[in-house]
Image (spheres, rainbow, N blue to C red):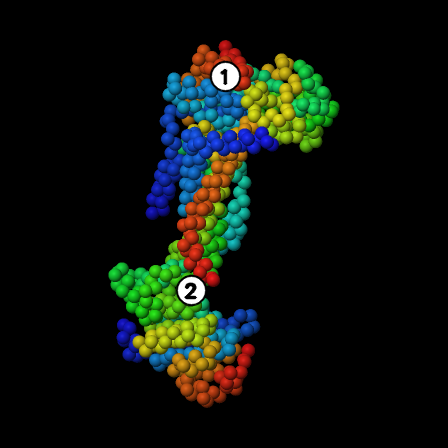
Amino acid sequence: MFVTWIRAGALALAMAGAAQAAEDFIVVQSTTSTQNSGLLDHILPAFEAESGIEVRVVAVGTGQAIKNATNGDGDVLLVHAKAAEEKFVAEGWGVQRFDVMYNDFVLVGPVADPAGIKGGADVVAALSAIASAQAPFASRGDDSGTHKAELRHWQSAGVDVAAASGGWYRETGSGMGATLNLAAGMGAYALTDRATWIAFANKGDLEVMVEGDDRLFNQYGVILVNPEKHPGVKAEAGQKFIDWLIGPDGQAAIASYTLDGQQLFFPNAR
Amino acid sequence: MRDLCNDTGVLIEATGLRLVRGTKHLLDIPHLRLGGPGPTVILGPNGAGKSLLLRCLHGLIRADAGQVRQDGIPLDGRQRMRQAMVFQRPVLLRRSVAANLDFVLRRQGLPRAVRRERIAELLETGGLSGRERQWARSLSGGEAQRLAILRALATEPDVLFLDEPTSALDPGATQAIEALVKQASAKGVRIVMVTHDIGQARRLARDVVVMIGGRIAEHGDALHVFDNATHGTVRRFLAGDLIF
Amino acid sequence: MQEFAQEFRDAFALILAGDAELLAIVLLSLRVSLFAVFFAAVIGMPLGAALAVGRFPGRGALVVLVNALMGLPPVVVGLLVYLMLSRSGPLGVLQLLYTPTAMIIAQVVLVTPIIAALSRQVIEMLDAEYAEQMRSLGLSRFATVPVLLWDGRIALLTALLAGFGRAIAEVGAVIIVGGNINHVTRVMTTTIALETSKGNLALALALGAVLIAIAVTVNALVSLLGQRAEVREAMRNA
């Protein structure tokens, strides 16, 4: 009797949740920057039409994306934190890492520019100036690729942001968009990837302050989650997607994505 | 079964009934024997333990000591099914008038057509004909209490307990209830009714139990008790003094 | 602000135009939350009834626990369900993560305590009124439960509505276990979160207005359903 009820419940639940979408799909763990910028919406339809494989994107911070992939909750990882990605592969969670594309980070800030850094091309010097002016700075604080990059630059500048946390250094613990919303709201500086910045619609009086520094280079990589660790991984379909992404069609699709006349990502697969 | 009981009458007996809360004796009844055709009216001032006694006799409350017997059998589920009770405030289901009656008829396993017929009969008895589909809780106080009595009668009880059924009603509504009670009594239902209305006791009772402070002060034939009460407090109570 | 008001009007007009994609998102929201409320009711109402009429050791503690669980943080629920459904989790083989089913499960966890706690309250109050009468009619405590459930149906419907309100407005849990995947697990609230993070505040707010409209509509429908009985009740009280 009881078992019958449980069975009926499970069946009803299965029916309730049934997705009417294609059976052949892969889950890509990626970052907010690829989704919020609109890149994936732009390039994925071409792949899906050609391969018949639906790509389901879970867009979270790089740290969480890697964590989810480590748990086997995804077939492909598309993120931007090279050191963490290489560690992911070295530990056996991923099969192999491929460069896909790059863009760059920009340091944005309020027009008033209380730290006086506008127009500079040295991100480390700019951050030092912000620290000494104690001008508000909004950090992701979420272990994302952008956050990792930002922390590297603070270290180069010799600034202990942990000490300033809660003061002029504000950690949002949220995505890039939420952090930019906060920066716009309180007139703070922030480090953002250029793609999210260009696509972001609530800039307020924020402007690009520092750009063009080689150290602001932002490389994206793609990795197939290791099916030996997680037998559920759809290795064949996942590899197909990776091959497409780093092949001529995928690279061309990435290059063709522009917003306001600006190219957001630059393909550089080898 | 029913007729057999009526021939001999139902006999309800309580022995050594005691209910204590702290140091207070709420009920202390060495022996009570309710025989004869009734109606029995239990009278007494507030807090005398009338309602408690009724609940003990109906098995809603277990006394700390003592026993209740019906026709010599200790009160059990089967004996209780021969009883019904109507409360001071009628507890009507949040359903239609007919559904309130149907609720008990269905438990008797009667087929639908029979139930519908019985409902019509019952409603006619209680002067509620044609009110089947009305929402029970929109009835007036008197109508609601009549429906509660009809629902109790629908279980075809041998004994019907009523706990101050008219205490909140005006004279007209009270009269309708009393008529219904008399009618049931005439048909052989043994009535045991609690009231603090002495006039009502005079109108209905064949025998009277007067309770004071959890004890039975007088018990006997109604005319005898009203005219020849020996207990001082009972005399004052019956004379209309305020006893508390 | 002037500019924002204009943007909001534009966004709202766009939504009212009946965009097919948006419609799919709204329907998914409704489907997920309605199913969640259904399952939560199947679990929560008997649980609430048992807490209301049952007399067993630990009942008091259980009542406190269920009441406390009404305030479960959605993100915590999302995480717990994620850990269960993750490929590395105990239920990973079911492959439910990032599906609407996962979202339903998370919402069931969130909503069940609400329905259970409110049902308990409703049934306990009704039981206080009915208990003696039902016992007099020879019903066991157990047999009384269906009577209490049926007669408390209007108030219980309100408990379901409270649960639905919690489910449809919730974002923290569904974004973790659903993944906010376009066309698969994207619902109203996760869309609002996404548009906010893109800085499309006007669009996000307009979507919020739609969400509120849906909540109001559902509440209005239910109150219409209950009205007849309510009116009778009111007549009695008058």
Q: Is residue C165 left or right of residue A176?
A: left
If the image is split into quadrants, where does the N terminus of chain B sit? bottom left
If the image is split into quadrants, where does the C terminus of chain B sit? bottom right
- Dot label at residue C33: none
Q: Nearer the viewer, residue A19 or A228?
A: A19
Total labels drawn: 2
| Marks 1 & 2 on one chain | no
Amino acid type at circle 1 is: Tyr
Where is residue A254? Give x, y as percent. Answer: 49, 15
Where is residue C171? Give x, y as percent. Answer: 51, 36
Q: Give the quarter of the image for residue A54.
A: top left
Q: Which residue does the image show at 72% across and 24% down from the upper left? A: A114
- Residue B24 drawn above or below residue A38: below
Where is residue A152? Give x, y as percent. Answer: 64, 20
Amino acid type at circle 2 is: Val
Decide if residue B57 is in sight here.
no
Cα distance in 3D space between marks 1 and 2: 73 Å
Q: Which residue does the image show at 60% across and 22% down from the upper left? A: A192
- Residue C104 drawn above or below residue A34: below
Q: Is residue C24 left or right of residue C192?
A: left
The numbered mark 2 sits on a residue in which chain?
B
- Dot label at residue B91: 2
Q: Nearer the viewer, residue B170 or B14?
A: B170
Q: Which residue does the image show at 44% across and 35% down from the upper left? A: C26
Where is residue B173? Give x, y as percent. Answer: 41, 73
Q: Secondary structure at mark 2?
A: loop
Q: Which residue does the image show at 68% across and 32% down from the upper left? A: A166
- Dot label at residue A257: 1
Q: Nearer the viewer, residue B129 or A127?
A: B129
